[in-house]
Each structure stands twice: as structure tokens, then as C-alpha cells.
């Protein structure tokens, strides 16, 4: 009986692994569709990372002019961001280049859950004169 259960478990392993697609990137249009909001028009250095399985995870990092970055963050987290707040982006640890393990100095952060179907976590930090860097983690629930 134990041997049979072990064989079933071993046979199911590859099938379960096949349910999860390898990490990939997304086009700006696909990011906008997933987030249900436009990206900042003056953005630069957009980097994306996504995983899909039962749920979908989208990570992105970009730089934008201050006003555009602030407006983008406000659309993602309508209740506003808090100075120094850590919405838990470090928990999304990944090999994604440019990802952060903790909010940088001078940053603002926040999170929002949308209708119990999608969660968004955001950190915004200075990125040079007139620019801000934005990190976003969004995932389906």
C-alpha cells in the first residue's frame, strides 16, 4: 500500500511541475492589461518578470518622471502610500534583476487588494533629479 502511494506521488510530480510555466517577461501592453491602468508615458528602463501557475505573479520595476510616478502609484494604491512603509516586496524574493529586499531610504510604500481577486504592492523611491523608481508586485488571489 505504501509502495503504491509512493509511486502515485512520484508520477504526479512531473504533472504538477508542468502546471507552472517558467518565469518570463511581459510587453508594456500586457502589463497595463493585468494592472488595469496605463503605465507612465515618460517611463524608462521598464523591467518585468512574471510567473503563472494556479495564480499569476507580475513584478515590475521602472523609472518615471516624479509627477507621472506619483500618479501611477496613486492609481495602483488609491488610499495613498506611507513614508518608509514596507508592503512586503522583500517577501517576493526572486532573481529578478533590480528587485529590492527592503524599501530604500526616502521611499514610500503601500498595498491594495482589489475585490478579493488581485493584490498590488508598491514602493516608490527617488531615482535622481526629477525621477522616481517604482517597484510593483501584483498577483491574483
Image: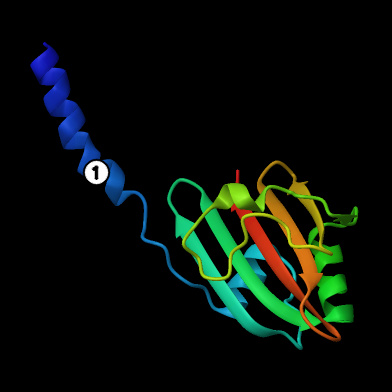
Location of residue 110 with respect to 44 vertically, above or below: above
- What is the image's colouring? rainbow
Q: Percent from the top left, x then y, of residue 17?
A: 29, 47
Location of residue 129 with respect to 24 vertically, above or below: below
- Residue shown at the point (16%, 33%) measured from the top left: 10
- Quadrant for the N terminus, please: top left
- Residue shown at the point (82%, 50%) measured from the top left: 85
Q: Quadrant of residue 16?
A: top left
Q: Percent from the top left, x then y, of residue 40?
A: 76, 80
Q: Is residue 21 left or right of residue 32?
A: left
Q: Which residue is mark 1?
A: 15
- Residue shown at the point (71%, 54%) measured from the top left: 121
Is 115 in front, or is 91?
91
Instruction: Answer few, some or many: residues within 10 Å of disc 1's Cα (few below 14, many 20 plus, some between 14 and 19).
Output: few
Q: Percent from the top left, x then y, of residue 95?
A: 46, 62
Q: Is residue 83 left or right of residue 138?
A: right
Q: Is residue 20 left or right of residue 29?
A: left
Residue ranking furthest to the top: 1
- Secondary structure under tag 1 reads helix
Q: Quadrant of residue 11?
A: top left
Amino acid at each position: 500500500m505504501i509502495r503504491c502511494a509512493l509511486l502515485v506521488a512520484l508520477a504526479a510530480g512531473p504533472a504538477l511541475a508542468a502546471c507552472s510555466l517558467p518565469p518570463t517577461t511581459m510587453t508594456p501592453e500586457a502589463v497595463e492589461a493585468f494592472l488595469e491602468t496605463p503605465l507612465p508615458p515618460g517611463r524608462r528602463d521598464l523591467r518585468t518578470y512574471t510567473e503563472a501557475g494556479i495564480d499569476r505573479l507580475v513584478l515590475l520595476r521602472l523609472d518615471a518622471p516624479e509627477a507621472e510616478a506619483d500618479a501611477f502609484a496613486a492609481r495602483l494604491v488609491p488610499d495613498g502610500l506611507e513614508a518608509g512603509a514596507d508592503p512586503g516586496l522583500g517577501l517576493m524574493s526572486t532573481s529578478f534583476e533590480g528587485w529590492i529586499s527592503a524599501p530604500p531610504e526616502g521611499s514610500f510604500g503601500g498595498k491594495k487588494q482589489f475585490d478579493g481577486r488581485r493584490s498590488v504592492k508598491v514602493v516608490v523611491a527617488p531615482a535622481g533629479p526629477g525621477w522616481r523608481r517604482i517597484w510593483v508586485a501584483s498577483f491574483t488571489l
